[in-house]
Amino acid sequence: MYRFYSHKLEKTVIMLMAGEYFATQNGEVLYTVVGSCIASCIYDKERKMAGMNHFLLPGVVHPNEMTFSEIGRYGMFAMELLIGELIKLGARRNGLQAKLFGGGNVLQFRGDDGDITGSNIRFAKRFLELEGIPTVNEDLGGNIGRKILFFSDTDRVLLKRFDIRKERRFIKMEEAYKIRVFQKRPEKSPVMLFKK
């Protein structure tokens, strides 16, 4: 996460990278760039509390990985963490609304990884549906990247679609993140609690 002041916007901007989430009631602009990943903008319009997450995988982390995993990279945890932070700030669960972005087919996955981008999209929509959080806007799928500016005090989103293949730095960032996510985790040795 990176924080800076934008003279053009006259606001503080919080830039989220893959696996991160942020909730606020201070009117910051939340910014991220997604290709295959999903960015969820969730907000309580009446109370002016809002947040964003950015995740690559919909699935659940294996219990053995819980202590050394960046759990924000998984959709299930990223959504729960963001909603939890908003509730802590004072947002009303029944007042939450969402906007969804991303899920572009821009990265190459192994055949046995399944339909990652399609799974991301289905997961995000279904999760919000089950939580009773209406999705009021979405821009999902395709073969493009998306730059998202989410104005947390007004719930306005500025979206710029772009050919991510022509901007190699974004592809490199997503590829590096994908490699970290899919790399095999080291086996942990069992801990002996009692000596015989």
Image (cartoon, rainbow, N blue to C red):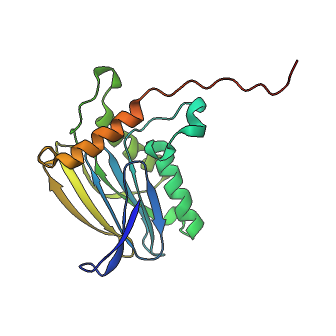
Residue 78 in the image: state x and y as whole percent: 47, 49
Residue reaching furthest to the top:
196
The C terminus: image quadrant: top right
User: Is 41 displayed left or right of 72 in the figure?
Assistant: left
Q: Is residue 140 visible?
A: yes
| Residue 103 visible to an observer of this rendering | no
* Residue 143, percent from left and from top: 16, 42
Query: Residue lying furthest right in this view?
Result: 196
Q: Position of residue 21 (x, y in %)?
A: 45, 56
| Pick the front one: 180 or 135 | 180
- Name above or below for residue 46 compared with residue 132: below
At 48% from the left and 43% from the top, the residue drawn is 76
At a point 33% along the width and 48% down the height, the residue shown is 38
Q: Nearer the viewer, residue 85 or 169?
A: 169
Q: Residue 121, how many percent across, how many down?
A: 32, 42
The quadrant holding residue 118 is top left
